[in-house]
């Protein structure tokens, strides 16, 4: 069962400034690209790095440590060295209110 957690307002999420939030014990990186929001597990599956500190480009986030790439929408690995996808969380905005589903 999905539980929706309100995490802020749309204006709290700024393109080019991913944020890390801990929601119900889950470390989640939240990204905004144009008017789209994405939420991924923050911890890189390859090592000890935070994807909220990564570089966003072409629908992916690049890990700051060894430059693995993960798809923002699905969490799939788009470039090694990571092999295991990160979890992608559903995220939605209703009016200005942003929620993540866990
Ligand atoms: Fe992310 Fe190595 S820690 S690619």
Image: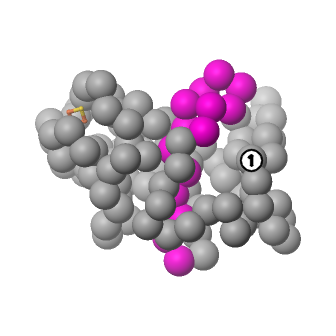
Identified at 50% across, 69% down, the residue is 15
Q: Where on the picture, by quarter, is residue 101?
A: top right
Give above or below for 102 relative to 12: above
User: Which residues lie in the magenta part?
Assistant: 21-34
Q: What residue do we see at 25% from left, 45% from top?
A: 64
- Can you say whether 1 is above or below 39 in the image? above
Of the four image quadrants, the one with ligand 1 is top left
Q: Residue at x 76, y 61 (%)?
A: 9
Q: How is the image coloured?
A: one colour
Q: Nearer the viewer, residue 42 or 19?
A: 19
Q: Is residue 84 left or right of residue 88?
A: left
**Can residue 61 be seen in the rendering of this structure?**
yes
Q: Place residue 50 in its image quadrant.
A: top left
Which residue lies at the image location 71% right of the left edge and 66% below the top edge? 10
- Residue 4 locus on image (x, y percent): 80, 41
Which x, y percent locates residue 102? 70, 34
Q: Is residue 56 magenta?
A: no
Q: Is residue 73 visible?
A: no
Percent of width and height locating residue 62: 27, 51
Quarter the N terminus occupies: top right
List the residue tagged with mark 1. 7
| Left or right side of 18 for 81 | left
Along the horizontal axis of the image, is 34 left or right of 2? left
Q: Secondary structure at mark 1?
A: strand
Percent position of residue 57, x then y: 31, 66
**Residue 86 falls left or right of residue 21:** left
């Amino acid at each position: 069962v999905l539980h929706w957690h309100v995490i802020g307002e749309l204006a709290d999420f700024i393109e080019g400034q991913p944020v890390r939030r801990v929601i119900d014990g889950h470390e989640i990186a939240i990204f905004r690209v144009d008017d789209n929001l994405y939420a991924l597990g923050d911890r890189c599956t390859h090592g000890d790095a935070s994807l909220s500190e990564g570089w966003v480009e072409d629908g992916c986030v690049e890990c700051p440590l060894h430059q693995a790439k993960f798809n923002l929408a699905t969490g799939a690995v788009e470039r090694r060295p990571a092999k295991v996808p990160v979890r992608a969380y559903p995220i939605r905005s209703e009016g200005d209110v942003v929620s993540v589903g866990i």
